[in-house]
Image (tube, grey):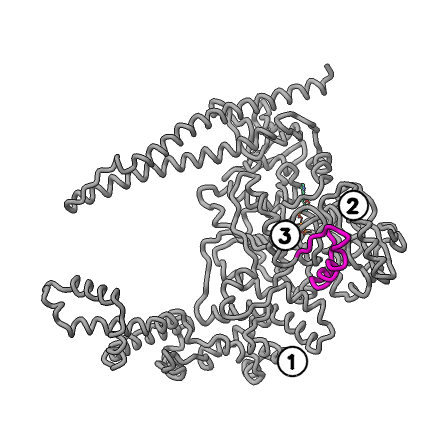
Amino acid sequence: MTEKNEEWQKEQQYVSFVVKEIKRRMKSIIENVGHLKEGIIGLRKTFWEDVTINLDDAHEVGETFTSIKQQAEMLSERERTHKHFYKQMKNLERLKDSPYFGRIDFLEDGEKQPETVYIGIASLMDEKDEDFLIYDWRAPISSLYYNYSPGPAQYEVPEEVIKGNIELKRQYIIRNGEMKSMFDTGVTIGDEMLQEVLSNTANTQMKSIVATIQKEQNEIIRDEKSKYLLVQGVAGSGKTSAALQRVAYLLYRYRGKMDADNIMLFSPNYLFNSYVATVLPELGEENMKQSTFQEYLQFRLGKKFTLDDPFSQLEYLHTSKQEEDYTSRIQGITFKASLKYKELLDKYVKYLSHSGLLFKDITSRGEVLFTAEDIKNYFYSLESSITIPNRVRLTAEWLLKRLAEMEKEERKKDWVLEESELLDKEDYLETYKELQKDSYNEDTFNDLEEEQALLAKKVVRRRFHPVKKRIKQLKFIDIKSLYKQLFHIELVEELGYKPLKNWKEISNLTLQYLEKNELLYEDATPFLYLTDQIEGRKTNTVIRHLFIDEAQDYSPFQLEYLKQLFPNSKMTILGDINQAIYAHSMEAPTLLSEGLYDSKETGRVTLTRSYRSTKQIVEFTKGLNPNGHFIEAFNRQGELPTLTESNYKDELHKGIVSKVHDLLKKGHETIAILCKTAAESREVYEDLKNDLDIHLMDKESHTFNKGVLLLPAYLAKGIEFDAVIIFNASNEIYGDESERKLFYTACTRAMHELHLFTLGNVTHFLDNVDQGTYCETGSSTIL
Ligand SMILES: Nc1ncnc2c1ncn2[C@@H]1O[C@H](COP(=O)(O)OP(=O)(O)OP(=O)(O)O)[C@@H](O)[C@H]1O
């Protein structure tokens, strides 16, 4: 037998040995769980039998309480153990199929024998619980596998650095408990394995990448020092993947101290949320909380306004260029995203500390109980050194006190007597009970006066209840008018701010929407910021780690707001500046801009290698990106992207239909036809729906299935497809420089094939693309 075969056999024997141990454990759990389950069912059934209930006197009540408590604790302890077994069982099931994917032999300095470390998605101990048969990929020693090639290496355990030498680094592909392949690897984690993973067809759900995490991705996953970790990574470089493995890592590293509820991910849209939802369960962990920033805005503002969303803003950006106030709106968007605007708001808040705060009358059934003027006078009579939110609170307390006095006075009024006569039976009964309870003398109930007083109290309390509620909710502050007031040029000048050239137009537009009770997306965060400065900050202290994906879409203003909202949270901020498609982020700073963070508490990782697309696609898309020269392609071969120019719409449609059939025949499972806007997608859907089984997606789509999908490029952010067809890559559609990043984002969604179709001349974005990186097919084939 050759040395190689011998090695293979030894490895296969180890796989079999480990799988046998896994099966033995599973069997033992099944037995234990069986007993435990019976125990739980039995305990539930006999719960009350085993509890001694005696409520005769205080002592017996105490005993009864203790007995119930003990019984309940026993039950929940067993249920906890049951849950624990269930989790273990799930992990074992995953391990049974593919127990590990890597191995290193590490000779620690001072030792004689190297330790063989097998690495998998969870740890497994031997039968005696003494040695690790498999190490969890997140264990400190496993970092060697991701960080080093054979040779000197070290890893950190709490308070110690362990040094030594890696003598062997090996990778395995194990399926159904059988070894399919193994290879020793040098510098990076094997190209072979990555090749295999990346050449699969795209999935409608993202997969975990633990077996092939790259060194620079590992840096992101295991960073523990940074308060803010900024990741700039090119399209397809594994930012989202690294973020999700990082969540799993943090849950492991801080187990017992932090759980999935303490971690939150802000993602770009619903589709993305469901796309990434299976990665953590696949790794045996619970999903973190997931939301979109828009969802948060909706939660805070949705009742007050009709809220615009980022997608409508994008639609406007791309479809309304002819509109008169287009330039003002775009300038407004950029300004309102900036820290300059935040400074202006801060100045405004300072100003409001002395004058200018706007209040609303407090009314009840048309009658003014407190005038805005009265409230204002009280507010400004308070010490100006007290913060605005504290003065607001004191004002609310003052109002509630005065309301209580009014309530007392009100009880004597005629309407109260009239209304109390109209009360229903239940109210009378309740009053009767109340009187009985309060009274030691049975006769007092006969005292009609007392009963009536109580009924009057009830009537007035009921009438004033909504008023009280409104006061407690601080509805006496007129935040909307306050925000509007900021757009009065005199005020802006008084604040010492030199307004933008077209401030008037921006103001008019803003006010016009606010009049209709509509809040533009660009105004939503500033509006909330102002609200929180006046009413008191809303903070979330449960979240200890916040992940923000597609961070290039967020503005510096939004970052400041998020910092305020999550004061205790560390943040992992991931994005790609070349995919900044929003009006506010194209040329201005975004969440990825270093200047926004204190360098002492900020870590930075740059990913330049793209894994998603074939080398051919990456070489092509590099040319679209003015900073593309530093993008490296992973060496996975495929066909050249194609460009097909048509002169007629019909020709374009036929070309696309034929290409889709072609792609389906080749076995591609997710094929996306990407348009520029939702409006264009709807039009194309009408044109193609009779020729193709096609699924139109919009901003409300939550999931997607395999098949032919039609969607605007901005909704495909963060997602990938086997093949991408760009619907109309003409200069007419993608002519404006501001659309370059959107175009780049669209093209970089493709894993295996990319096809551009145009009606008329192709976009000038291709001017700098090396012609050798794509293939022109001339006029499209007519079927
Ligand atoms: N180390 C890796 N091993 C295997 N696959 C990887 C690795 N890194 C990335 N990938 C794959 O590359 C693809 C792109 O990854 P991901 O979506 O995380 O990139 P991204 O940087 O977030 O992309 P984008 O910014 O374009 O949305 C995914 O299919 C992912 O599984």
Give the percent coordinates (x, y) of residue 741: 73, 60
Q: Amino acid at mark 2?
A: Leu
**Residue at 70% over, 32% down:** 185
Q: CA distance from mark 2 to mark 1?
A: 50 Å
- Residue 749 in view: no
Q: Which residues are magenta?
A: 672-697
| 688 part of magenta stretch | yes
Q: CA distance from mark 3 to mark 2?
A: 34 Å
Please report whichever mark, 3 or 2, sits nearer to the chain's N-terminal start: 3
Task: Quickly name the residue at label 1.
Answer: 505
Q: Observer-nearest residue: 146 or 548?
A: 548
State which mark lies toward you, 3 or 2.
2
**Residue at 45% over, 63% down:** 538
Say which quarter of the image contains residue 149: top right
Task: Quickly name the residue at label 2.
Answer: 663
Q: Secondary structure at mark 1?
A: helix
Q: Amino acid at mark 1?
A: Glu
Task: Quickly name the residue at label 3.
Answer: 231
Q: Secondary structure at mark 2?
A: helix
Residue at far top of view: 1
